[in-house]
Image: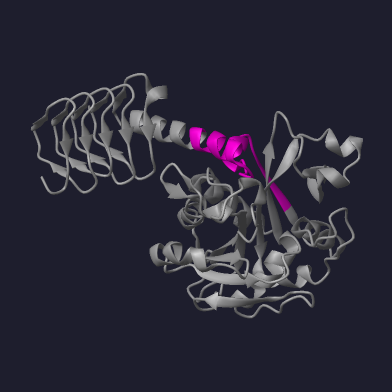
Amino acid sequence: MTSHSGHSKRPTAAGLVLAAGKGTRMKSALPKVLHPVAGRPMLAWVVSALSAAGAAPACVVLSEHHDSFAPFLAAHPEVRIAVQKNCLGTGDAVAAAAFAFAGATPAPYAAGALVHGAPIACDVVLIAAGDVPAVRGDELAAFLHAFHASGAAVGVLGMRMPQPKGYGRLVTDGGLLEAIVEERDADERIRRIDVCNSGVIAAKSRVLFPLLHALTQENAQREYYLTDIVRHARVRGLDLMVYTTDAWRDFAGVNNRAQLAEVEAWLIARERQALMAGGATLHLPETIYVEADVVVGADSEIGAGARLYAGTRLGAGVRVGPGVTVAGATVGDRAVLGAGSVIEKDCVIPAGSHVPPLSVRTALG
């Protein structure tokens, strides 16, 4: 695509999040993607990563029963919502999302509707699952950049895994992607492949939605697999690309409470690393709980067992004692929070002040 000035114009990209799954293994009345991880719903982590990568706005595909998403939508008014009525797999989800994209012709089997927001016009669609909260915006941005540079019609983000069991494998020939094969449909040769499908796919919008028309239910699950678009793209002679990363932990999906705990532990570890990289000292860091959206100034010290919740703002040179809880408060430079103290949400601790051990401070004083 070329602008009138003769300079190359970067293609526009939008996000597409697949989030219609019931999440029955969570054994919860709350939809799986709304379960909080490190202070933020799973779905919010994914939408934020897509936005950071330049794929915005995002369309989220939900089932018809989506009343519980009202608080999420209030916090993310830019998000579009498409409904998937049949819930017959990932291909069916993207086919249902076609109703949310300007100029897209839905596949014959598609049953969906745009129920929130205006249709999206974009050159590229970046697709991700809603239950992969550890996905990082910079990783998606690197993939999207490589996809734009390749000129390919479809791109797949692959992850090299030490234990690939359970994941779809990326089958290549001479470095070119041939197919994505789900493990239940794979033979022994394919199961030995260690480069797996992360679930993140980029595709030119003018190619993606027509490819969905070719999908069938001829597989073990009797579903429409989105991954089959790779095979159909090959048949049509379209260019395909693979971007491979070793950061497989960032693409771990959540299907049950144990996996939720594992991913949260990884996210919190990343948050701690970010604080230390920014100049804070963490004593026994593995004992410190840090949620998303926490800011800590340089030369601050955080004691063992401290808990810093979303929205917490600590200035420079702050001393946080062992076992302190800061629940979304603002603490000024060089303040000292005594061991075991609790600083409640929206409380403001002035610079240079001292909070005695075991005391409680609230926004009311």
Is there any visible trace of residue 203 in the rendered image?
Answer: yes
Q: Is residue 26 above or below residue 271?
A: below
Q: Is residue 132 a member of the stretch shown in magenta? A: no
Answer left or right for 296 relative to 116. left
Answer left or right for 235 relative to 203. right
Q: Is residue 258 a member of the stretch shown in magenta? A: yes
Quarter containing the C terminus? top left
Q: Is residue 83 above or below residue 89?
A: below
Percent position (x, y) of residue 84? 66, 69
Front one among 238 and 121: 121
Is there any visible trace of residue 7 in the rendered image?
Answer: no
Residue 163, quarter of the rendered image:
top right
Numbered range of the magenta stretch:
241-265
- Residue plotted at (60% across, 59% down): 19
Answer left or right for 253 relative to 213. left
Quarter containing the N terminus? bottom right
